[in-house]
Amino acid sequence: MARPLRRIALLGATGSIGRSALDVIARHPERFEVAALTAHGRVTELLALCQQFRPALAVIGDPASLPALASGLRERGLKTTALAGPEALDLAAADAGSDTVVAAIVGAAGVSSTLAAARAGKRLLLANKESIVLAGQVLMREAAAHGAEILPIDSEHNAIFQCLPADGHRRGIRRLILTASGGPFRGRARASLHAVTPDEACTHPNWVMGRKISVDSATLMNKGLEVIEAHHLFGLPGERIDVVVHPQSTIHSLVDYIDGSMLAQLGNPDMRTALAYGLGWPERIDSGVVPLDLVAQARFDFEEPDREAFPCLDLAYAALAAGGSAPASLNAANETAVAAFLAGELPFLGIADVIRATLSESSTEPGDDLEVLLACDGRARQTAREWIRRMQG
Ligand code: NAD
Ligand code: MG
């Protein structure tokens, strides 16, 4: 019997994850069809992708760019429908034309479309970690209620997913161990980080990624967000989710079982492995990733994270322990502070200061109501902006 085509809606098609997903998809025209593509503002790039992948639907986040998208599609003789704005993103996520949604928008901007995909019962390939940090309880509840399958794309969570029993049981796990590269400033003392620039922070030793997640990797907030993400995906408390620095980034994470077995997933640092796993699941498909050469690799080093130089990690653990809306406030403060750092308005070390100050001023509300969480997100952004202004003055 012929294998049915999987029809993919790719949210955030012009980003780093989006490009990697399309690279894998293009290798398997007999398996995948692109149903929808979305981008925020890069119309020319989106048009080129529409020409190549011929989706039924193209969505541009910024409504001002809709006329350019629509006329560009017409000029190319494409039948793709053009839409714009946040509601159109939700529509692309929930549209009956797809069965699989790749959530690859960056930041809380992706929460609504990620939830729309869960509520529509899609197979959800989750890269957009901010949405599960902001609204993890809601996302897991809605996915369960509507039969959506969540396949983690974040490389650490994808690794853990691969190391868990195939029957989905979580028995016998002592703890999860997330590996961290340590980022571009690994080994540096806190005092040496005052004047680092956005470009230095975005020069990651092992991965090529969007600028926001690159800064998160440099502060270790990325690992903090991933601890919260792992808590929701795998149902373990923060005390049973550890972080170890592994500078080679070839062991993508581990599961420590009570019988003394430790299972790990290894590979070259290339997101196409996790994306191919999610796209092909439960089958394995070619990703284009070069196989890991163990002899050339030779070493696997491990060290403790430097919690003094990189306090964002413990801020995230504290937010997870506080529960409720605290992770939503943490994420919102982080997004605001990182944007200010990238704009040259806040020093690198100010990122953690802004988050700490914002959290100490935020009340903790229940974590099971999206409206409440979005209100907390909005207030935390405002508080963070006030702190950034104060620090400038
Ligand atoms: P990126 O900045 O390269 O791409 C982001 C994409 O989202 C772009 O297509 C952009 O057009 C779209 N977008 C941005 N703002 C938007 C908005 N307001 N509305 C609608 N669309 C918007 O980011 P990335 O590195 O590809 O990361 C995407 C997500 O995947 C993030 O949540 C990140 O944490 C996660 N992730 C990325 C990597 C990686 O290797 N890049 C690894 C693990 C997880
Ligand atoms: Mg990761």
Image (cartoon, rainbow, N blue to C red):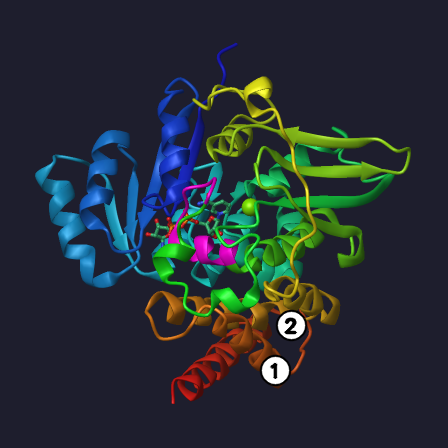
Horizontal side of residue 238 vs 189, given as left or right: right
Say which residue appears at 58% left-offset and 70% top-offset.
Answer: 330
Q: Residue at x 66, y 57 (%)?
A: 228
Return the residue at label 1.
362
| Closer to the camera in the image, 223 or 114 | 223
Q: Position of residue 73 (x, y in %)?
A: 16, 42
Real-space Cα separation, disc 2 to disc 1, in angstroms: 8 Å
Q: Disc 1 marks which amino acid?
A: Ser
Secondary structure of the residue carrying tag 1 is loop
Tell me the quarter of the image containing the C terminus: bottom left
The x and y percentages for residue 281 are 58, 27
Amino acid type, residue under disc 2 in the picture? Ala
User: Which residue is drawn at the image coordinates 28% and 31% (left, top)?
Assistant: 53
Q: Is residue 121 magenta?
A: no
Identify the magenta region.
Answer: 205-218
Give the percent coordinates (x, y) of residue 328: 58, 69
Q: Nearer the viewer, residue 333 or 305?
A: 305
The reply to whether dot 2 and dot 1 touch (C-beta < 8 Å) is yes
